[in-house]
Image (tube, grey):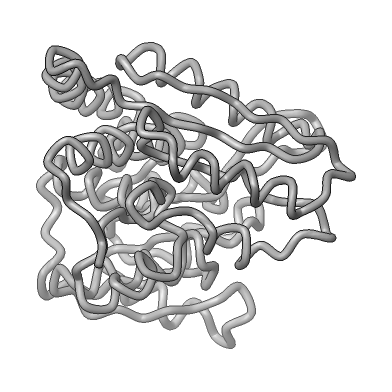
């Protein structure tokens, strides 16, 4: 029997409808949630992501503005822009589109964003607070995965979760969020020796390596939940994930497709975090 497909696009639409009602309540109070996106350079993929985010904002009732800087822009110029946005009461969320050019210090740029406006969840405060379960804004991709598990009534407590990937954007925060919900968590990388011995024991397998179709059917425990965070473009132009979808779906209990799985949820959680930031601003909540 084939796995049950976790339709990220359908779930994203449902979650956006729920949160658009919260945005509407703020608008009725005279507060329109606002998101500012900063993009440096002309990275084609980044430009597509930004356009998708702007379009999603307009669909849910969020004001958005994009600040474009050339590839050779000075870092101080971008930092000044962030400081101005930090002080702008109409902007509740600030997102710096990664990757930045090589001459930028990523950590310094991200750290310059006010914690109350860090809707990407990358600020050191929010990342560190994941350890104690008190983060204000969870990183959007792991947050989206957690919502997928919750809405599909997939138990986490007591389950063995294996995360392949150790990035600051997905792997590490994903592990902490699963741990917070009571899972026993194993973190692997694409270079882990005998990787299959770990993945075969996973009740929940989250894959974020950036290696096309790396996880095969023989690496998956029958009935496991397989979450594919990767998205790769093949030489023929087609998109695929880090999981061999066609083969693994015949083994797994649940599986996310690529595209149409985790991707739509990532943007959705950014919108949710922006609305949450506006709600916190309306009530005067501050990080001290």
Q: Picture coordinates of residue 216 (x, y %)?
A: 53, 59
Which residue: 31% across, 30% down? 7
Residue 39 lies left or right of residue 140; in this view the side is: right
Residue 157 lies left or right of residue 269; in this view the side is: left
Compared with 130, 264 (above or below) is above
Q: Quadrant of the N terminus?
A: top left
Q: Picture coordinates of residue 236 (x, y %)?
A: 80, 30
Compared with 106, 239 (above or below) is above
In front here: 91 or 179?
91
Which residue: 48% across, 77% down? 196
In front here: 132 or 90?
90
In the displayed image of the protein, which residue is found farthest to the right? Answer: 72
Residue 248 lies left or right of residue 132; in this view the side is: right
Q: For residue 223, which quarter of the picture?
A: bottom left
Which residue: 69% across, 46% down? 78
Compared with 137, 2 (above or below) is above
In front here: 266 or 2?
266
In front here: 45 or 25?
25
Q: Picture coordinates of residue 56 (x, y %)?
A: 42, 19
Q: Is residue 272 visible?
A: yes
In the displayed image of the protein, which residue is found farthest to the bottom? Answer: 193
Q: Quadrant of the C terminus?
A: bottom left
Q: How many marks?
A: 0
Q: Is residue 265 visible?
A: no
Residue 89 lies left or right of residue 113; in this view the side is: left
Which residue: 26% across, 38% down? 4
Q: For residue 279, which quarter of the picture?
A: top left
């Amino acid at each position: 029997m084939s796995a049950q497909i976790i339709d990220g696009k359908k779930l994203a639409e449902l979650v956006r409808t729920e949160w658009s009602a919260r945005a509407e309540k703020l608008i009725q109070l005279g507060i329109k949630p606002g998101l500012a996106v900063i993009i440096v350079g002309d990275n084609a993929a980044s430009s597509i992501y930004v356009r998708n985010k702007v379009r999603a904002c307009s669909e849910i009732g969020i004001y958005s503005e994009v600040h474009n800087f050339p590839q050779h822009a000075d870092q101080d110029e971008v930092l000044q822009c962030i400081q101005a946005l930090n002080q702008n009461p109409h902007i509740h969320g600030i997102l710096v589109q990664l990757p930045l050019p090589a001459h930028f210090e990523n950590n310094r740029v991200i750290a310059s964003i006010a914690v109350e406006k860090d809707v990407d969840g990358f600020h050191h405060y929010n990342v560190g607070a994941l350890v104690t379960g008190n983060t204000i804004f969870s990183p959007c991709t792991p947050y989206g995965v957690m919502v997928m598990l919750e809405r599909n009534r997939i138990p986490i407590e007591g389950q063995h979760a294996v995360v392949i990937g150790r990035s600051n954007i997905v792997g590490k925060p994903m592990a902490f969020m699963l741990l917070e919900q009571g899972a026993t968590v194993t973190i692997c990388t694409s270079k882990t020796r005998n990787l299959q011995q770990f993945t075969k024991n996973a009740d929940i397998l989250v894959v974020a390596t950036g290696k096309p179709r790396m996880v095969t059917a023989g690496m998956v425990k029958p009935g496991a939940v397989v979450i594919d965070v990767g998205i790769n473009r093949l030489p023929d132009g087609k998109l695929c994930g880090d999981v061999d979808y066609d083969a693994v779906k015949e083994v797994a209990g649940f599986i996310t497709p690529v595209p149409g799985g985790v991707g739509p949820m990532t943007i959705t959680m950014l919108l949710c975090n922006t609305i949450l930031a506006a709600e916190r601003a309306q009530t005067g909540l501050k990080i001290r």
